[in-house]
Amino acid sequence: MRTFRVTLIGGIISYRALFHWVRPASFVGSLLAAPLFQLLFFVFLGRALGVADDRFYVLGNVILSATGACIFGGAMGVANERVYGTLGHVLLSTCRRGALWAGRSLPYAVNAVAVMVFTLACATALLGVRMPVGSLAGLAAAMVVGSLSCTAFGIMIGAIGLRFRNVDTIADAAMMLLVIATGAEVPHSALPIWLDGIGLFLPLTNAIDAARGSVDGLAGSAVMIDVGREVLVGVGYAGLAAVLLKYFEYRSRSGLSLDAV
Amino acid sequence: MTTRPGRVIRFTLVGLRTHLLYMSRSVTTVLFTIATPVLYSLIAIYLSHAATHPARVIQASVAAGLMGIWSSVLFQSGTAFQRQRRLGVLELIVGAPTPILLALFPITLATAVIGAYAMATTVFCAVVFFGASITPFLSPLFLAAVLVCIVTLGFVGVLMACSFIMLRNAYALVNTLEHPIWMLSGMMVPLSALPGWLHPLSWLLPSMWGTQAVRDSVVGGPVAVPITIALGTGATYLALAVFTVKRVERRALALATLTLA
């Protein structure tokens, strides 16, 4: 029961307290409008260059729209504890760390799915892009798994923010990397091999492939392979986040610098 | 006293130098002023398979450089007053005998000059990594067109700073305006790719005319007309800023919430 309370209620409280974009104006501007305008930018760019159809950019940018909530949310959800001077209280608490950090991840993942659905709905309404009904299950799976893996990535960045001050810089750089290397805006075939290879280890790459595969009518098993790869990437980043959080906590205790790392 | 032409010029130059040095010391500011345009130029180059077409590389790098100038003006000017508020000098600026507009213009001009770092970086990448010729970038017309872009976007920055001063969530609006202005200015997405009903909106933007001037200077087209219109529309924005800042100043003095907004 206590673990459940820490995970669910603690997660919601931390989301409300630490996520700067939860205010309505910031939420609408940064999480809803900005990704939608980015989607429209790339749709029109794609039309001008004649590279791919609207559906390619819509699906890529719908999945990519999760980055704001996941990366910045995950980063704020961890690093802002130090900003507000409550990091010591968190590190001194006796609650299970897994429940604590998992609870902080869930609201951002839910937020990301909501942003994706909103972006998809607007793109469908504005651009007339239709998704086959049979693809919705695969699309939903790609969205959920993508948001979870991207949130794990964001938590990992937040863990880095416990050690380094410029977590916003790191988060911005991570977002840029996702824009160019995940295949959201540039087809895999057009990317240099080394950049495409980096993309395999980033969140959202496989989720985007799963979403496109589902809409293109690929077999469910093929889509699930991409979903499975995304799960693996997410588990990897979750593990890395856990290790970093544990390590930085150990360092802060051993150096008697709970809030001064 | 501070409105004599000689003093205005000196004040502007000293303020420009001060804020330029201050902003240039921020690694985050410089990094993302440079990195975002490079990212978008790479995306455009990969999408159009332009790596082996120097002309397309030049187009992509120029477009991305202009996008960088706008992003710098948008993010730095839009939050200029919030920054001064955080530094604790906003009340001093508003209360000083120097007109607010005169105090603000060097800040916004500095943001546009910082944005020129983006142009320099994308041009450097085009020349060094993709073998583009540097000759078009050294022409006086190109440099004049870029200078006009910087000055007119500085005017737009003044209007933005004045308009956003009373907004707590200016950053949300700033996040929203990046991609729309890129599109409406025709910086990377040609205006012909946009719906026709958006074109009149484009004509109202000095950035659209500045973009056309820069593009024409590279391909050898007529530059005088777009430069003239850019300066004219920029002056209109400056006039709007004069009107807005007077209202904002009266409201700020009446409400006495300048440090709290």
Image (cartoon, rainbow, N blue to C red):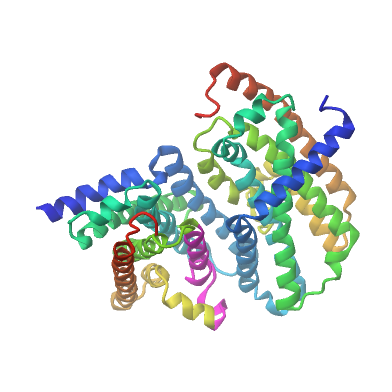
Is residue A225 among the parts visible in the rendering? Answer: yes
In the displayed structure, does residue B89 sit left or right of residue A16? right
Q: Is residue A140 above or below residue A51?
A: above
Q: Could you say where residue A29 lies in the image, as x and y percent from the top left?
A: 48, 43
Quarter location, residue B92? top right
Please say whether residue A117 is one of the residues in the magenta stretch.
no
Is residue A50 among the parts visible in the rendering? Answer: no
Point 61% across, 55% down: residue: B26
Point 30% across, 65% down: residue: A254
Q: Could you say where residue B56 lies in the image, as x and y percent from the top left?
A: 73, 70
Point 20% across, 47% down: residue: A9
Q: Could you say where residue B188 lies in the image, as x and y percent from the top left?
A: 67, 59
Q: Could you say where residue B122 lies in the image, as x and y percent from the top left?
A: 70, 66
Q: In this view, does A120 lie above or below B106?
A: below
In the displayed structure, does residue B113 sit left or right of residue A17? right
Q: Is residue A242 above or below residue A80?
A: below
Point 84% across, 47% down: residue: B227
Quarter location, residue A261? bottom left
| Residue span colored magenta | A169-193
Quarter location, residue B67? bottom right
Quadrant, the N terminus of chain B: top right
